[in-house]
Image (spheres, helix red, strand yellow):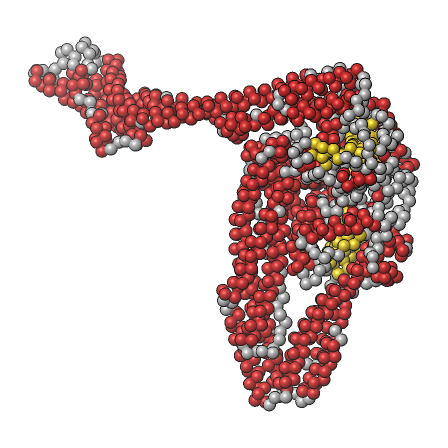
């Protein structure tokens, strides 16, 4: 069917009602104003909005993240397969669908930038065009759709979690024109942060929104009550402060499912027609205001060059924030510098006056001498009876001299010495006070002389008590005035000596203040530009007519009727067979065999090897010279017998790990829910005498580990380390988290906030149990592993389940999701990858390879080649969702291509429905097991356990038997030699043993370890390059546009949280790579030890003598935090690069910050790696030396035993015949392996 000439949604104006016309006219005025102001983009969008109003058609937009079922739902509403639908991301364009005769209009952007139409497009070709995100700019479809009538149009959008800029722009454009939004999520991912962020943005935008939970047929009442699931979703929406117009549950696969509300959705859509005009006005008003904000943002961007210049003149973002404070501080400093000399002199005056005021110069003895002087000056004063004039004058002079001497002593001791000290202090501070100055200082305060003393005696003064006190006071005051005058003159000289320095400082401060004045002027002009932009936005919004617009609270939005109680409580019928048979092509025979073997199969990978070794040990019993070899065989056999076959499950939350584990054991052992449940490490093991079926051993975290977890989560949320360390106890740590809002936290940090809040709620009940272990069962067990208030205190749990799998010795380990809060314990996860016998990675059919999956797969890919055999299996769970064999093949190919990107080649991929597989096992339905894909997987997995792992164990046993066979051959050869030759051989062996022991005990030469050091350097070099190659992914994930939306949240806080998330992502990537490098270094150490032992034996002349090669030791090489010492960027630096989402993502902000962040982080990483290299080199050298010493001791013992055996052959009749029989039997034993 080809398109004829069609009227598109944007070309078919109709007569609008008065209020629509009024509003449309206002929008056009706004458009003209925006264009006149130089913003053609905002003007165009406003014109587009006005044109939409003229059509009188309400637009219903369908959004959601990829593979949620948007396109499938739109197709169902249209009654035709108009859009492509697949679990792999498909829709790359916004597709608008309206009622009418079949026609398609497709526009694309030509090379010259002009928009052109693709002629002759048929509805059948629509699927191909809808996935062409680059070539196609818009798609509009008409098709006979009675549901829509002439009132409504549907819009399908790309996934909201896309990292493609074109997809984001397309979705944003659709929302701009949308009157109602239907947000679609699938049942298993309804609580994804992506959903809540987008719903929150729609709420803040004011868009009426309905949430549709698709795939409700995946709900199992036995796993979680529907009411509990619905109430949990409502609580989460309330926590995010999201108000919905309605909540609907659908099943596109099973339209007749009792929980599916397709009829309610149709009723809602039908009812929306009656609210069309109010919806149109409300949506136009909200979008117009949003566009006014974009217009303001555009104005700010057009001012960008000028603003950048002014910002630079103002000192940048950080300088602008502190400008006023800095100006005030500089002004105060300048005033201080200008008055410093005066203030210093004033201070010295006060200090001097205080000294003078507190100093007494005329004590009683001095006053008595003063009285004597006054007395000698009285009329009629005579000496002796005769009173000769000469004697009288001599007495006056003597008394005057005594007073002068006494007063001088008082002045020197109580005043002069202190004043000179003050002057010396100030001179020293001023950098002056040389010898000449010191000499002048001594002369500055001469002793008071008799003439001065006499000059102060007033004519007619008496000699009584009052007169004496008055005279003494005048002596003290006059002398202090002299000292003060002299001291101040000297102080002024000192202060003046520093005046040039003060003037220079004042000049510098004045200059700085002048510069700040220039900066302040720039800041004022910057604020004027802000005011201009705000005013322009205000004027634009003022053009909107306020009458006739209904707030969202006033809209009569149709609400779907809640599901009736009888509907939610009635049992849900079991799933029928999947649409596509999941049994692998070519695997029917194996699957049939597996189904027949059923529950009686066993994973006996090591039993065969253990039996061979036990037989060999029994054969060696009669030979004391082979006692050490017999002990080694017995020990290895016992180890194999006791070995548990460990199967580790990994994957993101809701991938179905727990469900798949239940399918493997054939019973619903682990709790299963669409919400993240596995918060601890669950091990499913066989029952024991003290642990019957259905019981679990719960191991609580140690108190120190719990505090470390709390501290780690707080640090991930940006809490400063010193604040965490200052917290005295859990209450203080919880208080740090209580003040945080999810709005200010990076999405990948929100699980940490949830963990902290759950721990706070559960602390009183579960905190006292830290460090303990106990038995739980039933509901108690499920609470400890699935209820976050309890599970956050649990380290691990061993669930005892009686099933064929566990009875065979297998241990099934269900790990927390790769995206869970416990993902910080990546070291624990790595140990399971390293030591497990099999690794099963479970991914979800409709969401294959989330971000957490990709991070984990980097780690899997980096260690895959370090294992002796490929022990990884990839399970594509919920594959029963496939609608066709072609779709299933496409998703499997997508999984394989993604694995290849992570270095995983030729992966074993198994599409499985764990849900149907478990139901089939419980029902004893062999055909159901085959169609669920579980039988195929179990058959392949059993072959791996029995054949590949068993062959590996047998190959190891064969090597051990070969070495012992060579020892038997050697003993037999010695037995046929003469006595002298035997004695010589024994002595040579003992000498060689001693020589090796001495050489290796002294430590290997440096050259021996050098290859290991070089390999370490090469490993670290390449791991750094790999992480840096992935830096762009880390940056885009951390600074994702969906996180940094201008939706009312504090972007300054969010940009900091993005930086912290980037550090975390790169840091964890480095740590994961380092652990992989550590595994490869352990293997390299084992190889080097083996070569060293072989060379040593050869050099000692022991050719033909074989010993067990040293195993690669588990070194536990330390892996520290890469960015513990920084870089630490503050919000000002980050904001300077960010400024706004438009500047950051559409201009140069993102690229500039990415380059700077990359340089800073990898500079820190280089310093960290240098420390790692030094620490690891020391650890490897010590391990190499220690292992060589241990081998020397063992080898010496073996050679001594061998030499004893050679000598014993002289004394033991019939030994040669016995050895020949052993040799023959040994050959038979080996041939059977």
Image position, residue 239 (x, y; %):
74, 33
Q: Is residue 707 visible?
A: no
Image position, residue 453 (x, y; %):
19, 18
Query: Is 779 left, or right, of 423 in this rendering?
Result: right
Give 1095 or 462, whichever is nearer the viewer. Answer: 1095
Query: Is 311 left, or right, of 1107 in this rendering?
Result: left
Residue that extends furthest to the top in the rendered view of this protein: 460
Identify the residue at image location x=7%, y=16%: 388
Q: Quadrant of the C terminus?
A: bottom right
Image position, residue 961 (x, y; %):
69, 75
Identify the residue at image location x=81%, y=30%: 5
Q: Is residue 952 visible?
A: yes
Residue 1102, by quadrant, is: bottom right
Residue 639, by quadrant, is: bottom right
Q: Quadrant of the N terminus?
A: top right
Identify the residue at image location x=69%, y=34%: 109
Identify the residue at image location x=58%, y=22%: 530
132 shown above or below 544: below
Give 906 or 622, whichever is nearer the viewer. Answer: 906
79 shown above or below 931: above
Image position, residue 269 (x, y; %):
85, 29
Query: Is 565 left, or right, of 401 in this rendering?
Result: right
Give 586 or 727, whichever is nearer the viewer. Answer: 586
């Amino acid at each position: 069917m080809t398109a004829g000439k069609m009227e598109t949604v944007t070309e078919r104006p109709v007569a609008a009602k008065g209020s629509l016309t009024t509003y449309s006219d206002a929008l056009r005025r706004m458009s003209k104003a925006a264009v006149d102001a130089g913003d053609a983009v905002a003007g165009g969008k406003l014109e587009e909005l006005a044109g939409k109003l003229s059509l009188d058609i309400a637009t219903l937009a369908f959004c959601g993240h990829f593979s949620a079922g948007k396109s499938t739902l739109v197709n169902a509403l249209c009654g035709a397969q108009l859009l492509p639908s697949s679990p792999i991301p498909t829709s790359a364009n916004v597709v608008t669908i309206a009622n009418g005769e079949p026609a398609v209009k497709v526009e694309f952007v030509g090379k010259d930038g002009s928009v052109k139409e693709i002629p002759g497009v048929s509805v059948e070709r629509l699927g191909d065009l809808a996935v062409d995100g680059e070539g196609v700019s818009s798609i509009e479809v008409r098709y006979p759709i009675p549901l829509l009538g002439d009132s409504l149009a549907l819009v399908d959008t790309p996934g909201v979690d896309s990292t493609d800029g074109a997809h984001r722009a397309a979705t944003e454009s659709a929302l701009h024109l949308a009157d109602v939004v239907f947000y679609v999520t699938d049942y298993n991912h309804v609580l994804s942060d992506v959903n809540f962020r987008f719903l929150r943005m729609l709420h803040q935008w004011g868009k009426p929104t309905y949430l549709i939970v698709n795939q409700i047929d995946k709900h199992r009442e036995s796993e979680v009550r529907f009411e509990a699931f619905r109430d949990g979703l409502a609580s989460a929406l309330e926590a995010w402060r999201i108000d919905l117009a309605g909540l609907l549950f659908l099943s596109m696969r099973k339209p007749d499912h009792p929980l599916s509300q397709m009829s309610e959705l149709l009723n809602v859509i039908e009812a929306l027609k009656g609210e069309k005009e109010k919806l149109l006005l409300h949506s136009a008003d909200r979008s117009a205001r949003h566009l006014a904000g974009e217009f303001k943002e555009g104005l700010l961007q057009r001012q960008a060059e000028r603003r950048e210049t002014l910002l630079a003149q103002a000192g940048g973002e950080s300088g602008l924030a502190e400008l006023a404070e800095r100006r005030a501080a500089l002004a105060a400093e300048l005033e201080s510098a200008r008055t410093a000399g005066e203030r210093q002199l004033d201070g010295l005056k006060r200090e001097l006056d205080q000294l003078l005021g507190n100093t007494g110069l005329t004590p009683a003895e001095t006053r008595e001498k003063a009285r004597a002087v006054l007395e000698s000056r009285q009329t009629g004063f005579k000496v002796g009876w005769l009173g000769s004039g000469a004697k009288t004058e001599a007495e006056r002079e003597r008394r005057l001299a005594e007073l002068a001497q006494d007063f001088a002593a008082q002045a020197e001791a109580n005043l002069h010495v202190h004043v000179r000290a003050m002057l010396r202090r100030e001179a020293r501070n001023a950098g002056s006070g040389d010898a000449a100055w010191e000499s002048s200082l001594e002369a500055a305060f001469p002793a008071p002389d008799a003439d001065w003393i006499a000059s102060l005696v007033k004519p007619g003064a008496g000699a009584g008590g009052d007169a004496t006190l008055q005279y003494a006071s005048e002596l003290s005051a006059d002398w202090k005035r002299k000292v003060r005058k002299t001291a101040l003159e000297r102080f002024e000289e000192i202060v003046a000596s520093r005046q040039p320095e003060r003037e220079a400082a004042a000049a510098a401060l004045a200059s700085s203040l002048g510069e700040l004045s220039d900066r302040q002027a720039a800041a004022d002009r910057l604020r004027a530009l802000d005011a201009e932009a705000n005013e322009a936005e205000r004027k634009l919004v003022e053009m909107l007519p306020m009458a006739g617009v209904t707030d969202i609270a006033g809209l009569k939005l149709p609400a779907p009727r809640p599901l009736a109680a009888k509907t939610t409580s009635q049992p849900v019928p079991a799933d029928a067979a999947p649409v596509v048979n999941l049994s692998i092509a070519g695997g029917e025979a194996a699957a049939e065999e597996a189904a027949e073997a059923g529950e009686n199969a066993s994973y006996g990978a090591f039993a065969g090897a253990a039996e061979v070794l036990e037989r060999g040990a029994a054969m060696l019993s009669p030979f004391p010279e082979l006692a050490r070899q017999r002990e080694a065989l017995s020990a290895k056999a016992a180890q194999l017998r006791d070995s548990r076959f460990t199967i580790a499950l990994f994957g993101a939350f809701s991938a179905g790990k727990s469900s798949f584990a239940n399918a493997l054991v054939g019973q619903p052992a682990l709790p299963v829910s669409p919400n993240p449940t596995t918060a601890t490490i669950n091990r499913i093991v066989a029952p024991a005498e003290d642990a019957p079926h259905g019981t679990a051993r719960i191991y609580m975290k140690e108190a120190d580990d719990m505090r470390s977890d709390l501290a780690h989560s707080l640090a991930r949320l940006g809490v400063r380390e010193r604040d965490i360390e200052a917290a005295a106890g859990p209450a203080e740590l919880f208080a740090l988290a209580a003040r945080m809002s999810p709005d200010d936290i990076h999405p990948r940090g929100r699980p940490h906030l949830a963990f902290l809040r759950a721990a706070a709620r559960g602390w009183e009940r579960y905190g006292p149990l830290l460090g303990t272990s106990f038995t739980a069962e039933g509901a108690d067990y499920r609470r400890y592993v699935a209820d976050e208030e309890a599970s956050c205190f649990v380290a691990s749990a061993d669930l005892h389940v009686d099933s064929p799998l566990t009875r065979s010795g297998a241990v099934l380990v269900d790990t927390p999701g790769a995206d869970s809060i416990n993902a910080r314990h990546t070291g624990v996860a790595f140990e399971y990858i390293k030591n497990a016998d099999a690794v099963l990675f479970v991914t979800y059919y409709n969401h294959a390879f989330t971000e957490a999956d990709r991070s984990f797969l980097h780690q899997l890919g980096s260690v895959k080649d370090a294992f002796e055999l490929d022990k990884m299996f990839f399970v594509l769970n919920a594959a029963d969702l496939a609608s066709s064999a072609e779709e299933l093949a496409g998703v499997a190919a997508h999984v394989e291509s993604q694995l290849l990107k992570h270095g995983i080649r030729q992966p074993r991929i198994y599409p499985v429905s764990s849900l149907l597989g478990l139901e089939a096992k419980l029902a004893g339905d062999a055909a159901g097991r085959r169609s669920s894909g579980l039988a195929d997987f179990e058959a392949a997995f059993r072959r791996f356990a029995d054949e590949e792992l068993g062959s590996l164990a047998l190959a190891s046993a064969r090597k051990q038997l070969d070495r012992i066979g060579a020892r038997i051959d050697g003993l037999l050869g010695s037995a046929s030699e003469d006595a002298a030759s035997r004695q010589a051989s024994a002595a040579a062996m003992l000498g060689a043993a001693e020589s090796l022991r001495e050489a290796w005990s002294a430590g290997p030469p440096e050259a021996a370890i050098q290859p290991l050091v070089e390999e370490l350097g090469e490993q670290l070099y390449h791991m750094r390059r790999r992480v840096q190659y992935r830096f762009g992914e880390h940056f885009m994930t951390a600074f994702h546009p969906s996180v940094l939306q201008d939706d009312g949240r504090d972007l300054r806080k969010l940009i900091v949280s993005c930086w912290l998330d980037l550090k975390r992502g790169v840091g964890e990537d480095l740590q994961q790579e380092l652990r992989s490098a550590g595994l490869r270094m352990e293997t390299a150490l084992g190889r080097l030890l083996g070569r060293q032992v072989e060379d040593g034996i050869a050099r000692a002349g022991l050719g033909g003598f074989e010993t067990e090669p040293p195993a690669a030791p588990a070194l536990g090489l330390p892996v520290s935090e890469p960015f513990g010492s920084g870089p630490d960027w503050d919000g000002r630096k980050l904001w300077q690069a960010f400024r706004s989402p438009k500047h950051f993502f559409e201009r140069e902000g993102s690229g500039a910050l990415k380059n700077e962040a990359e340089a800073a982080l990898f500079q820190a990483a280089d310093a960290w790696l240098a420390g790692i290299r030094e620490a690891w080199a020391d650890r490897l050298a010590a391990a190499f030396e220690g292992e060589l010493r241990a081998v020397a001791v063992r080898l010496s013992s073996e050679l001594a035993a061998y030499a004893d055996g050679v000598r014993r052959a002289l004394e033991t009749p019939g030994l040669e015949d016995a050895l020949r029989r052993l040799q023959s039997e040994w050959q038979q034993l080996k041939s059977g392996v």
